[in-house]
Amino acid sequence: MITISKDQKLVTFINIFTVEPANQRRLLDLLVGVTDTFVRHAPGFVSSALHRSLDGTKVTMYAQWRTIEDYEAMRRDPAPLPYLKEALTVATFEPGMYEVVETFGATKGSP
């Protein structure tokens, strides 16, 4: 389960894929497949969540890793490459590496 907290000191990746609406489901299936089969089992993986835009043109993956080195080690593993290469045949990819600065929750009594 994803917990977003500035106190966790994790590396956060927010990766945005741009896709034709007709290919959004295919891209989601590929990302679910690679994450479930390989990525989630890699040392240092903490969690991830997939989001799809309502207009069908974007897929965003939010992922947390213990360290940059853990993430880079997973990227060097050749096993996930076929999934990732196929994903890039239907989408463009804008990666981003972040750290959590602050989080906010609803105030008491808010709906």
Image (cartoon, rainbow, N blue to C red):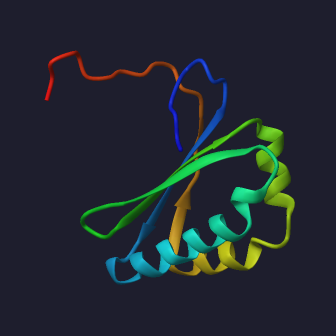
Picture residue at 57% right of the left edge, 76% below the top: 30
Q: Residue furthest front?
A: 109
Percent across and percent down for residue 59 are: 43, 62
Picture residue at 52% right of the left edge, 24% below the top: 5
Q: Is residue 28 above or below residue 64?
A: below
| Number of disc labels | 0
Specify whether residue 87 is in view.
Answer: yes
Q: Nearer the viewer, residue 74 or 4?
A: 4
Picture residue at 70% right of the left edge, 70% below the top: 37
Q: Is residue 85 above or below residue 17?
A: below
The C terminus - image quarter: top left
Q: Nearer the viewer, residue 43 or 27?
A: 43
Percent across and percent down for residue 31 are: 57, 69
Q: Nearer the viewer, residue 83 or 92?
A: 83
Picture residue at 83% right of the left edge, 41% below the top: 69
Percent across and percent down for residue 89 are: 57, 81
Q: Tell me: 5 left or right of 110.
A: right
Q: Quadrant of residue 110?
A: top left
Q: Tell me: 12 left or right of 90.
A: right
Percent across and percent down for residue 108 are: 21, 15
Q: Quadrant of residue 103?
A: top left
